[in-house]
Image (tube, grey):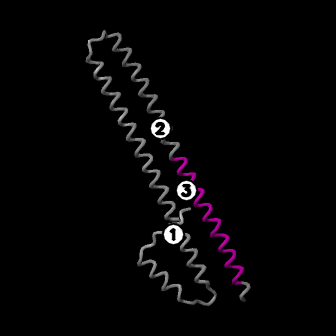
Amino acid sequence: MIKDTHIPPFMEEGLNAFKQFKFSGVDTENLMSTYQKNLELMNAAQQITVETAQSVAELHNQFMKNAIAQWNDQIKYCYSKAPLEEKTTYHAEATKAAVDHVIEHTRALNSIIAQSNAKLNETLQKRFKEGLDDSINMTKKSKEKR
């Protein structure tokens, strides 16, 4: 999980002001710690999402460059003085290569997205388990105080 937190100044001021309040039966410091951890989780999830979007954009950009280059080659060859049979064979091979390239691109996209989803899921599950542990500890502390 990312430790770098980006809490806006107005929220930091609000958190500090809230820490000073004391409520009977409520551990405000623990509550604020939980809130801080949830903000860190949101930051981590956003970072994972941004990195995934950048990876997908880079991959798609390269795919489009290659597709346009292949298309240009096909057009040039189509207008060449090669015999019709060679043009037809070349076109069929180029089409097969283009389809293979699309399949490879789709697999790469799916892999990036699956890795991102796994990382997000792991991060969320870890925080959820920590939250449950925190909840159990707060309940135990509240029983002990009574």
Distance from disc 2 to disc 3, alpha carbons, whole Å, reads 21 Å
Residue drawn at the location 43% of the way across and 28% of the way down = 99
For the residue labelled by badge 3, is the local secondary structure a helix, a strand or a loop?
helix
Residue hosting label 3: 120
Dividing the picture into quadrants, the one containing residue 84 is top left
Residue hosting label 1: 39
Residue hosting label 2: 106
Total labels drawn: 3
Q: Main structural element of the magenta stretch: helix, strand or loop?
A: helix
Q: Mark 3 or mark 1: which comes first in sequence?
A: 1
Residue 80: image location, x then y, percent? 27, 15
Residue 44: image location, x then y, percent? 51, 61
Q: Amino acid at mark 2?
A: Thr
Distance from disc 3 to disc 1, alpha carbons, whole Å, reads 15 Å
Q: Amino acid at mark 1?
A: Leu
Point out the image quarter for the N terminus. Answer: bottom right
Residue 91: image location, x then y, percent? 36, 19
Point out the image quarter for the C terminus. Answer: bottom right
Q: Badge 2 local density, few (<14 within 10 Å), some, or many (20+)? A: few
Residue drawn at the location 49% of the way across and 39% of the way down = 108
Q: Pointers 3 and 1 in contact (CB under 8 A)?
A: no
Q: Amino acid at mark 3?
A: Leu
The magenta stretch spans which residues? Answer: 113-142
Q: Is residue 32 above or below residue 62?
A: below
Q: Mark 1 or mark 2: which comes first in sequence?
A: 1
Dividing the picture into quadrants, the one containing residue 81 is top left
Q: Mark 2 or mark 3: which comes first in sequence?
A: 2
Residue drawn at the location 46% of the way across and 28% of the way down = 100
Left or right: 48, with 34 as reference point: left
Q: Badge 1 local density, few (<14 within 10 Å), some, or many (20+)? A: some
